[in-house]
Image (cartoon, rainbow, N blue to C red):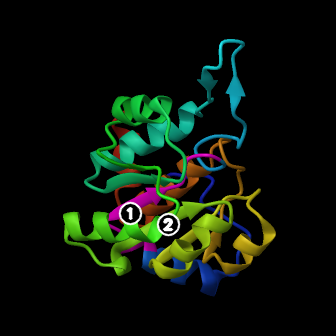
């Protein structure tokens, strides 16, 4: 058995409930700014936008996709950088420019023939709250707005852009019994 960061200080009964929910996940949806990034947007002198993505998060997404779990993003902003990064990671479900994230959620659940009981969502701020409350496993990153954390089923140990998404990917893989085989692939 692999020992990983999946040993949290949450009450055992609550973690069992989280694992039960994670075992049923078929789609992981992510916000971008504040979840896949550290919430900062950099602009160059000529006005180009820059974002930094965590490599551990990226590999976690690739590994999760390899196990058969779909991954997608829903973000209020639009950025060619996000499109490029998601393409690099093999994320096919990219929903940018959705001020009402519920519309994107409806579109993706319809296109994949899923219900909200099969979806996990990771967010950090108020626009994420309706989806966090609607899906089977609503997750907030460690540095999410306190109000959002209060409504999440689970809170990561890592901050957004600092490995939080990797934690979530490993949680799902662990709950579904695929984490060990993913790790063993690298031995």
Tell me: 172 left or right of 51: left
**Compared with residue 176, is residue 57 higher up or lower down, i.e. above or below?**
above
Which residue is outermost to the front?
46
Start-end of magenta stretch: 22-33
Q: In terms of depth relative to the viewer, which is nearer, 47 or 56?
A: 47
Instruction: Tell me if mark 1 has few (under 14), some (14-19) or many (20+) residues whose alpha carbon lies within 10 angstroms of its own.
Output: many
The residue at which mark 1 appears reads as 104
Q: Element under label 1?
A: helix
Q: Element under label 2?
A: loop
The residue at which mark 2 appears reads as 100
Which residue is outermost to the top?
46
Q: Position of residue 21 (x, y in %)?
A: 44, 78
Q: What residue is rendered at 48% in x and 81% in y?
A: 134
Q: What residue is rendered at 63% in x and 53% in y?
A: 5
Tell me: 156 left or right of 25: right
* Disc 1 to disc 2: CB gap under 8 Å: yes
Residue 187, located in which quarter of the rendered image?
top left
Is residue 24 within the magenta segment? Answer: yes
């Amino acid at each position: 058995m692999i020992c990983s960061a999946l040993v949290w200080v949450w009450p055992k009964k609550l973690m069992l409930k989280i694992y039960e929910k994670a075992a049923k996940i078929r789609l992981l949806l992510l916000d971008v700014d504040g979840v896949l990034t550290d919430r900062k947007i950099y602009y160059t002198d000529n006005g180009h936008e820059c974002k930094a993505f965590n490599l551990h998060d990226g590999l976690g997404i690739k590994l999760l996709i390899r196990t058969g779990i779909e991954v997608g993003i829903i973000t209020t902003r639009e950025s060619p950088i996000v499109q490029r990064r998601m393409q690099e990671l093999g994320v096919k479900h990219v929903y940018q420019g959705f001020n009402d994230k519920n519309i994107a959620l409806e579109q993706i659940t319809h296109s994949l023939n899923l219900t909200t009981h099969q979806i996990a969502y990771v967010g950090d701020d108020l626009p994420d709250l309706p989806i966090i409350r609607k899906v089977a496993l609503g997750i907030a990153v460690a540095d999410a707005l306190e109000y959002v954390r209060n409504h999440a089923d689970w809170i990561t140990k890592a901050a957004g852009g600092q490995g939080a998404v990797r934690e979530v990917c490993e949680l799902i893989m662990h709950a579904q019994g695929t984490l060990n085989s993913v790790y063993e692939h690298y031995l």
